[in-house]
C-alpha cells in the first residue's frame, strides 16, 4: 500500500508540473470537442494530433492523447441528449432517455447527470487502476475466445430487458441486427458475404452510420408529421440543475455502471461497446418503474454514461500492465508511446515509472478538469434547443452527413446512414425500438468470430465452453436469467389470461 | 485611412477571384502546388500508419506543401489500395502500403474473382523501412528451439495452433512459408489484427505466432514469449541470440516493409520530385529516431532497387498465398 502511495506521489509530482498540466488541459478540451462533433471520434482525433506530439516527451504526449480519449467520452453525451445523434457507438443508449428528458425540458439535468456520472465513473476507474492493475490484467488474459462467446451470450440475454416495446418486437429487431452483422468478409475463409461487389461492404456495416441514421436522421424525418412544441424557454439556472429527486435516482445507477463498465473495459477486444447497453438493460430490469424507461428515466442516462466512462478507463489496464491493445484507440495510444521510445509492455511500470505514474495521476486531474469544463457548458448547450427547428434540423442533417463521412472517409457509409434514416422513420411509425437492432449489429461480428475461434481451438468440440471456468460461470448466469424471466413471464401470462377469461365470461 | 467603399470592394474581390481561378493553371508545371495526400489503407496504429505519420511530418519541409494522411481502411488494406489505383494520377494521391500489397490480386485469382487492381496499377516510389519478423511461442510451451517445434508439429499435424492478424495477412503469409518449408501443418486461428493475435498467444489460446519484432519485443524481454527464429537475412539487432531461418536450414526471408506508391500514369517529373523528397525525408534524424523507437529499421530503397526488390518479394507472397490456398468452410 505504501509503495502505491509513494508511486502515486511521484506521479502527481509529474502531473502537476505546469507544462504537463497544460497538455492535459489541451487534451481534455480537444477530447470534449471531438466527442461532441458526431463522426470525428477519438480515433481520428488522436491520430490527427499524433504528429504534433513528436516534439514532446513521452509523458506529455501520452497525457494529452489520453485526455482526448477519455475527454471524448464526456462530450459524446451532449449531442445524444440534445439532438439524439449518437456521437459514437457507446452513446446510443444515452440517446433514448437523455433525449426524452430534453423533450420534457430537463436537458440541463440530463447533461449535468451525464457529466457527474462520467466523473464518478472515471475517477473510480482510475482508483481501481492504481490499486490493482497488474492482477486485473492477468484476469483479462484469461479471457480467450470461449469466455468472450459466453459473455456475448449473456449480452444477448439482456436484450430482453433492453427495449421499451414488447418482447416479440425486441427480438425481431435484434434478429434483424444480427443478420445485418453477418454482412462482410468471412474472417475464416475470405469469402465475401452479401457485399454485392462493393469493397467497402467487405468490412461489414458500420455501427456509427446505422446508429446515426436510425436515431438521428430517423427522428428528424418523423418530426414534421408531429405537432412540435418546444419546451425549452430561456432556462433559469435552477432548471438547469438536477433536482434532489433526480440525484437520488441516479446515485445507484452511477455506482453500478462504474463497476460494470470497468470490468467489461479491461477485457481485450471490442466488448466495451456493450457496457452501456448492458448497464441500460440492468437498470431497467431492477428499476421499480421500468415503464419510465424510454420516457426520460434518469437512471437510463446515469447508468450507461457511467458504464461507458468506466469502460474507457478500464481499457487502459491491459495496455499499461501487459502492452496489449483493447481496441483501436488504445492501439494508437500504444503506437504513440512506441514512437516516443517507451515500449508499452509488462515492464513499463518498472522501466518508466515517471511515464506510468505521471499518466495515472494526470487522469485524476483530467477527470476533474473535464467536470469543471463540462458543467458550465451545459447552460450554453441547452440554448442550442432554442434555435427554431426550421434552422436547427437542416444543420443537424448536415452534421450527420459530414460526421458519418469523416469516420472512414467513405461515401458508402453516408448511403448506409441515409438508408437507415428511412428505416428509422418507418420503425418509429410502426412502433419498433431501434436500440436492439444496434446491439445485434454490434454483437454479431464479435460473437461469430469468437464462437468460430473457440471451435477452431477445440477442433470442433462444443464442450470447450463447459471446460473453462469463466465461460462456464457466464453461461450459468445466462441460463439462470433465462429461466427466471421465462418463469416470471409464464406466471404473469397465466394470471393475466385467467383474469381475461374470467372477465369475458 | 481609406474607407472601403463598395466599388473598391467589388474590384478587389474580382481581382482575388481572378487570382484564384488562374492559380491552378499556373501551378501545373510546379508540382506540388497544393497539399499532397498519403492514403493509409490500415486502421490507425497499423504498420503503415505508425511509419507514415513520422514520414509525412518529415517530408513536409521538402514538399513545401502540407502532407496529409488520409485513412481509408478496409478489407485488410484492399480498400485504400483500390482507391489510390483508381485516383487521378497527378501525384496528389499517393499510397502507403506494406508487404501484403502483393497478395491481393493472387487472392482474387484464387477465388475466381476479377482482380480490382494488380501490382501493375502502381508505380513504386521508395521503400522506407523494414520490420524484422520473428516466430515466437508462448512461454508455457516446452519448445526451446525451432527444431523442438517442428518435431512436435510433425508428430501431431494440425495439433498446434498459430494465431495471425487475419487470413492472407502480413502475419499469416510468413507462417505459411515456414510451414511449407518445414513441411508441417498447424491450425490457423485468425483474429482481427496484430493486437488480438498477440493476446491469443499470451493467453495461451494459441501457441505460435509470427509477428514483427517491434510488436513482441517488450513481451520477449519480460519473458512472456520466446523467440525461436527470425525471418530476416541477418540476425536482428534487437535479438542477437535468435537465429535466422536461413541459419536453421529453411530458405525463407520475409519482412514487414513499408513503401510509397503512386497510381499508374503519374507523370515522370512528379515521380522524380517525390523520389528526391522521399530520400531526403527518410534521411532526417527525426524520422530515423521515430523508426528506431518503433523497433523497425530504416531500409531505404530508391525506385530502381525497390522495383527489383518488389518483384522478388511479390513472388514469395504469391507463393505463400497459393500454399494457403482456399480455406474450406
Image (cartoon, rainbow, N blue to C red):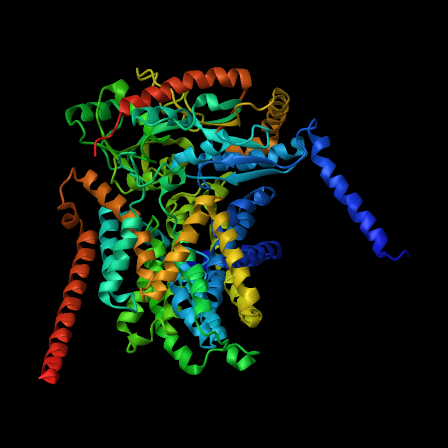
**Residue A409 at x, y percent in the picture:** 49, 44
Instruction: From the viewer's side, name the closer residue of B169 and A307.
Output: B169
Horizontal side, residue A2 vs residue B66: left or right: left
- The residue at 73%/31% (across/down) is B26
Horizontal side, residue B38 vs residue A429: left or right: right
Horizontal side, residue A381 vs residue A258: left or right: right
On-image quarter of the C terminus of chain A: bottom left
On-image quarter of the N terminus of chain A: bottom left
- The residue at 60%/31% (across/down) is B285
**Residue A158 at x, y percent in the picture:** 25, 62
Outermost residue toward the front? A225
Res B182 → quadrant: top left
Instruction: Report if residue B256 is visible in the image.
Output: no
Outermost residue toward the right? B1
The answer to whether A333 is drawn above or below residue B121 in the figure is below
**Residue B213 at x, y percent in the picture:** 40, 31
The answer to whether B55 is drawn above or below residue A67 in the figure is above
Instruction: Report if residue A172 is visible in the image.
Output: yes
Total labels drawn: 0
**Residue B129 at x, y percent in the picture:** 50, 27
Res A293 → quadrant: bottom left
The answer to whether A4 is drawn above or below residue B245 in the figure is below
The answer to whether A462 is drawn above or below residue B152 in the figure is below
Horizontal side, residue A165 vs residue B312: left or right: left
Instruction: From the viewer's side, name the closer residue of B314 and B106.
Output: B106
Instruction: From the viewer's side, name the closer residue of A176 and B313.
Output: A176
- The residue at 71%/32% (across/down) is B25
Res A171 → quadrant: bottom left
Amino acid at each position: 500500500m505504501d509503495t502505491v502511495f509513494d508511486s502515486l506521489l511521484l506521479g502527481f509530482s509529474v502531473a502537476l508540473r505546469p507544462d504537463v498540466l497544460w497538455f492535459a488541459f489541451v487534451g481534455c478540451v480537444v477530447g470534449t470537442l471531438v466527442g461532441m462533433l458526431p463522426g470525428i471520434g477519438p480515433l481520428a482525433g488522436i491520430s490527427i494530433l499524433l504528429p504534433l506530439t513528436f516534439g514532446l516527451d513521452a509523458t506529455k504526449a501520452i497525457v494529452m492523447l489520453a485526455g482526448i480519449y477519455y475527454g471524448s467520452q464526456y462530450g459524446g453525451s451532449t449531442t445524444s441528449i440534445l439532438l439524439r445523434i449518437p456521437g459514437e457507438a457507446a452513446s446510443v443508449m444515452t440517446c433514448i432517455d437523455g433525449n426524452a428528458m430534453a423533450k420534457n425540458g430537463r436537458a440541463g439535468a440530463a447533461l449535468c447527470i451525464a457529466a457527474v456520472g462520467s466523473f464518478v465513473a472515471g475517477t473510480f476507474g482510475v482508483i481501481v487502476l492504481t490499486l490493482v492493475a497488474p492482477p486485473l490484467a492477468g484476469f483479462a488474459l484469461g479471457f480467450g475466445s470461449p469466455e468472450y462467446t459466453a459473455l456475448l451470450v449473456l449480452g444477448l440475454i439482456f436484450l430482453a430487458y433492453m427495449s421499451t416495446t414488447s418482447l416479440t418486437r425486441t427480438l425481431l429487431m435484434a434478429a434483424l441486427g444480427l443478420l445485418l452483422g453477418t454482412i462482410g468478409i468471412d474472417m475464416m475463409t475470405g469469402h465475401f458475404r452479401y457485399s454485392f461487389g462493393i469493397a467497402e461492404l467487405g468490412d461489414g456495416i458500420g455501427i456509427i452510420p446505422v446508429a446515426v441514421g436510425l436515431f438521428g436522421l430517423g427522428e428528424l424525418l418523423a418530426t414534421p408529421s408531429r405537432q412540435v412544441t418546444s419546451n425549452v424557454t430561456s432556462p433559469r439556472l435552477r432548471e438547469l440543475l438536477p433536482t434532489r429527486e433526480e440525484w437520488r435516482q441516479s446515485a445507484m445507477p452511477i455506482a453500478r455502471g462504474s463497476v460494470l463498465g470497468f470490468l467489461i473495459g479491461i477485457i481485450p477486444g471490442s466488448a466495451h461497446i456493450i457496457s452501456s447497453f448492458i448497464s441500460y438493460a440492468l437498470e431497467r430490469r431492477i428499476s421499480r418503474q421500468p415503464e419510465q424507461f424510454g420516457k426520460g428515466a434518469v437512471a437510463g442516462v446515469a447508468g450507461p454514461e457511467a458504464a461507458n466512462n468506466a469502460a474507457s478507463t478500464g481499457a487502459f489496464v491491459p495496455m499499461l500492465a501487459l502492452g496489449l491493445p483493447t481496441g483501436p484507440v488504445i492501439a494508437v495510444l500504444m503506437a504513440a508511446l512506441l514512437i516516443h521510445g517507451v515500449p508499452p509492455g509488462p515492464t513499463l511500470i518498472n522501466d518508466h515509472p515517471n511515464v506510468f505514474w505521471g499518466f495515472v495521476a494526470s487522469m485524476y486531474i483530467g477527470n476533474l478538469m473535464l467536470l469543471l469544463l463540462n458543467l458550465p457548458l451545459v447552460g450554453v448547450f441547452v440554448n442550442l434547443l432554442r434555435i427554431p427547428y426550421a434552422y436547427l434540423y437542416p444543420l443537424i442533417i448536415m452534421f450527420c452527413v459530414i460526421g458519418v463521412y469523416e469516420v472512414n472517409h467513405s461515401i458508402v457509409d453516408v448511403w448506409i446512414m441515409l438508408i437507415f434514416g428511412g428505416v428509422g422513420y418507418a420503425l418509429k411509425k410502426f412502433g419498433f425500438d431501434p436500440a436492439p437492432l444496434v446491439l445485434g449489429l454490434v454483437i454479431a461480428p464479435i460473437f461469430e468470430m469468437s464462437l468460430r475461434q473457440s471451435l477452431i481451438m477445440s477442433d470442433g468440440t462444443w464442450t470447450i465452453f463447459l471446460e473453462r471456468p469463466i465461460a462456464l460461470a457466464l453461461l450459468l448466469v445466462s441460463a439462470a436469467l433465462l429461466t427466471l424471466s421465462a418463469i416470471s413471464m409464464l406466471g404473469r401470462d397465466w394470471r393475466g389470461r385467467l383474469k381475461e377469461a374470467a372477465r369475458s365470461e | 485611412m481609406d474607407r472601403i467603399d463598395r466599388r473598391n470592394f467589388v474590384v478587389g474581390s474580382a481581382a482575388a477571384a481572378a487570382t484564384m481561378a488562374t492559380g491552378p493553371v499556373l501551378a501545373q508545371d510546379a508540382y506540388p502546388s497544393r497539399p499532397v495526400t498519403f492514403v493509409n489503407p490500415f486502421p490507425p496504429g497499423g504498420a503503415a500508419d505508425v511509419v507514415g505519420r513520422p514520414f509525412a511530418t518529415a517530408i513536409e519541409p521538402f514538399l513545401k506543401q502540407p502532407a496529409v494522411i488520409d485513412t481509408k481502411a478496409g478489407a485488410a488494406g484492399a480498400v485504400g489500395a483500390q482507391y489510390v489505383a483508381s485516383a487521378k494520377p497527378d501525384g496528389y494521391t499517393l499510397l502507403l502500403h506494406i508487404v501484403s500489397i502483393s497478395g491481393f490480386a493472387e487472392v482474387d485469382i484464387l477465388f475466381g474473382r476479377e482482380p480490382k487492381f494488380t501490382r501493375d496499377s502502381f508505380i513504386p516510389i521508395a521503400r522506407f523501412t523494414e520490420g524484422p519478423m520473428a516466430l515466437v511461442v508462448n512461454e508455457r510451451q516446452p519448445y526451446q528451439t525451432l527444431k523442438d517445434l517442428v518435431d512436435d508439429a510433425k508428430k501431431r499435424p494440425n495439433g498446434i495452433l498459430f494465431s495471425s492478424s487475419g487470413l492472407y495477412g502480413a502475419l499469416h503469409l510468413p507462417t505459411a512459408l515456414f510451414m511449407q518449408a518445414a513441411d508441417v501443418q498447424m491450425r490457423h486461428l485468425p483474429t482481427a489484427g496484430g493486437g488480438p493475435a498477440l493476446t491469443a498467444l499470451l493467453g495461451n489460446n494459441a501457441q505460435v505466432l509470427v509477428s514483427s519484432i517491434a510488436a513482441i519485443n517488450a513481451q520477449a524481454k519480460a519473458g512472456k514469449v520466446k523467440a525461436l527464429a527470425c525471418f530476416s537475412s541477418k540476425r536482428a539487432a534487437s535479438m542477437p541470440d535468435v537465429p535466422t531461418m536461413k541459419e536453421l536450414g529453411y530458405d525463407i526471408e520475409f519482412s514487414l516493409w513499408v513503401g510509397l506508391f503512386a497510381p499508374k500514369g503519374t507523370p515522370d517529373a512528379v515521380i522524380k520530385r517525390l523520389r528526391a523528397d522521399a530520400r531526403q525525408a527518410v534521411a532526417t534524424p527525426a524520422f530515423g529516431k521515430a523508426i528506431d523507437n518503433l523497433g523497425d529499421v530504416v531500409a531505404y530503397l530508391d525506385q530502381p532497387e525497390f522495383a527489383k526488390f518488389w518483384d522478388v518479394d511479390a513472388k514469395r507472397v504469391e507463393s505463400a498465398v497459393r500454399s494457403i490456398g482456399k480455406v474450406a468452410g
